[in-house]
Image (tube, rainbow, N blue to C red):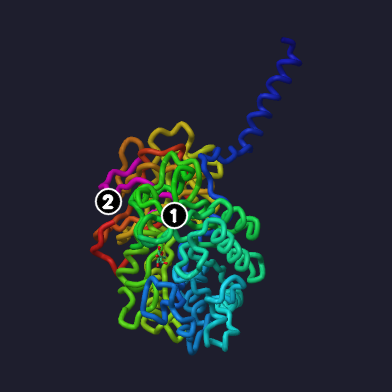
Amino acid sequence: MSKVWLFLALAFATLDSVLSKHRRLPPPLPVLPLPSAAQLRWQQRELVMFFHFGMNTFTDSEWGSGHEDPRLFNPSFLDASQWVKVAADAGFSLVILTAKHHDGFCLWPSKYTDHSVKSSPWKNGEGDVVREFMEAAQARDLDVGLYLSPWDRHERTYGLQLEYNEYYMGQLQELLDGEYGHVSEIWFDGAKGNNTKNMTYHFNDWFSTVKRMQGSINIFSDAGPDVRWVGGETGTAGTTCWSPINRTSLRIGDGSIIGYLNTGDSNGSEWVPPECDVSIRPGWFWHKNETPKAVDELLHIYYTSVGRNCVLLLNVPPNSTGLISEPDVNRLTEFRSAVTTIFSANLAEGAVAKGSSQRGGRSGGFLAANVLADDPQSYWAPADSDEDPWIELRLEKPAEFNVVRIQEAITLGQRIIKHEVYVKFTSVEQDERGLTKGERVANGTTVGYKRLHRLGRVVRAQAVWVRVTEARGPPLISSIGLHFDPYSKSQIS
Ligand code: FUL
C-alpha cells in the first residue's frame, strides 16, 4: 500500500471511531405483544370509578327481576356533577356509569323500549341520566365509560337470537354514535343468572360496531379485546399478572377461565390487561344499611390491584336521592390522602443509581439514573449480553421505608418473569463485582406497569437493588421508588 493510501485509510478509521463515539444505540427491539395507545393511556390512569345506579337503587336489590314499575325511579336531587367532583377529587380520571343493568331499565330514553327514564316520574319523564352524566364529566375534563348489560331480564326479545342481538346493537348505537360525545371504555358484563333463557350474544358484531363508532375506545369483557376481567370481584389480581393473554380460545361468561384471567399468560399473543372491579360497599348498588369499606381495606385493594399491574375500577354507588352519600365521600377523601402521603415522596430521590451494565455504555441514553427521573418515557436498559441484570440505588443517607415500587417500560413489552429486591442496612460495602452485599427483602414474579412490594416491616437501609433473575428479553425499568406507608406497617407484600 502506498503511503498516500495508508494515510487515507488511517484518517478514515480515526474519523469513523470519532463519529461512532457520538452515535447512540437506538432503543432495543420490542418484545411483543405491545399495548395500543388507548390501552397505555388507560393503564396510566391507575384508578377508574364505577357508578352503579338504576332501578336497584330504589328497590334495595342487586339483581332486579325486570318486572319493576318504572315509576319507582325518582331521585329527588340527582346531581351528576357531584358524582364526578367526588371522582376527580379522589384522583380518578375516568368514570363509568351503568346505563342499563340486568333488570333492563335504561337510564336514557332509548327509542327501542319504554322501560326507561321516560316512563318514570323523574323530571316528568323528560330526563336523561346518561346525558347529565356525560355533560358533567366533560365539564370537569373527566373521560367517561358506559356499562350496558347484555343480560336483560325485562326485554321480551331476550332469548330470540336475531331480535335481541339487534335490540342490543341498537342500544349500543344510541349510546356510542357520537350523540353523547366521546366514550373511552365500554363494559360488556359476562354475568347471567342460572335458569335464564338460552341466548348467544353476537360479541364480534357488537365489538366491530363499537370500534366503528368510537375508534379509540377500550372494550372490556371477560376476555377483552382491549381490557379483560381480572377473574374476581375483590380487587385482587394474581401475584403473577401478565398483561398478555391468548384470547381467541376464551369464551365470555365461562367460569373455568377465571384463574387464567387472574394471572394472564407469559406466552400470550395479545395485549389485554386486567381491570379489578370491586365495590366500596358490600353491594354494587346503594343500600341504606350498608357502609363503605375502611381506608386500610381500600389501601389493601390498591396494593393488590394497581400494585400488581392492574387498573382498579372502584364502584361508588349513588344513593336513592341521586347523590353519593357522605360516608363514601369522606372515605374517598381519606383514601386519596393516604395514597398521596405514601407515594408523593420517593425516598430514593438523590440516590446514585448504578446498573450491572448499560445499553450503549455510559454515553447511551439508557442510564441507570433514568429510574429516578420524572420522565415516564425514559428507562434503564442493560446490555443485550448481560446475563445477570441488576440495578442498585445508593442513598445519600439511610432511609426508612416499607414499600418498594418497580415499573417496567411497557411500551416495549412486558418482560420481567422473576425479580428480587435486596437492601443493605448500614454503610455500603461492595463485593468484587461492585454489587453491594445485603439481605433479600422481597421477591416476586411479574412487574409490568407497576409492582408494589409491601415489606411487612419498616426497613432502614442505605442501598437497595433490584435483580432480574428471569426475563423475556433485556429488562427495561422505567422507575423505582422507596416509600413509607404509615397505614399498613405490618401488612405483608
Ligand atoms: C357483575 C354483575 O352481576 C354485578 O351486578 C355488577 O354489575 C358487577 C360489576 O358485575 O357481573
Viewer-side residue, 209 vs 404: 209
Q: CA distance from mark 1 to mark 2?
A: 35 Å
* Disc 1 target residue: 222
Q: Residue at x 53, y 45 (%)?
A: 34
Which quarter shows the N terminus? Answer: top right
Q: Is residue 369 visible?
A: no
Which quarter shows the C terminus? Answer: bottom left
Judge whether 71 appears above or below 201 on screen.
Answer: below
Point out the stretch of residues depicted in magenta.
435-451
Report the side of 320 relative to 298 (left or right): right
Q: Residue at x 59, y 76 (%)?
A: 109
Viewer-side residue, 483 vs 110: 110
Ligand 1 neighbours mark 2 (CB distance < 8 Å): no
Report the side of 8 relative to 166 (left or right): right
Report the side of 268 relative to 484 (left or right): right
Question: Is 441 included in the stretch rendered in magenta?
Answer: yes
Q: Residue furthest right?
A: 4
Viewer-side residue, 54 vs 481: 54
Question: Is 156 included in the stretch rendered in magenta?
Answer: no
Quadrant containing ligand 1 reads bottom left
* Disc 2 target residue: 441
Ligand 1 neighbours mark 1 (CB distance < 8 Å): no
Pair 1/2: label in front: 1
Q: Residue at x 66, y 24 (%)?
A: 13
Which quarter of the picture shows residue 176? bottom right
At label 2, which amino acid type do we have? Val
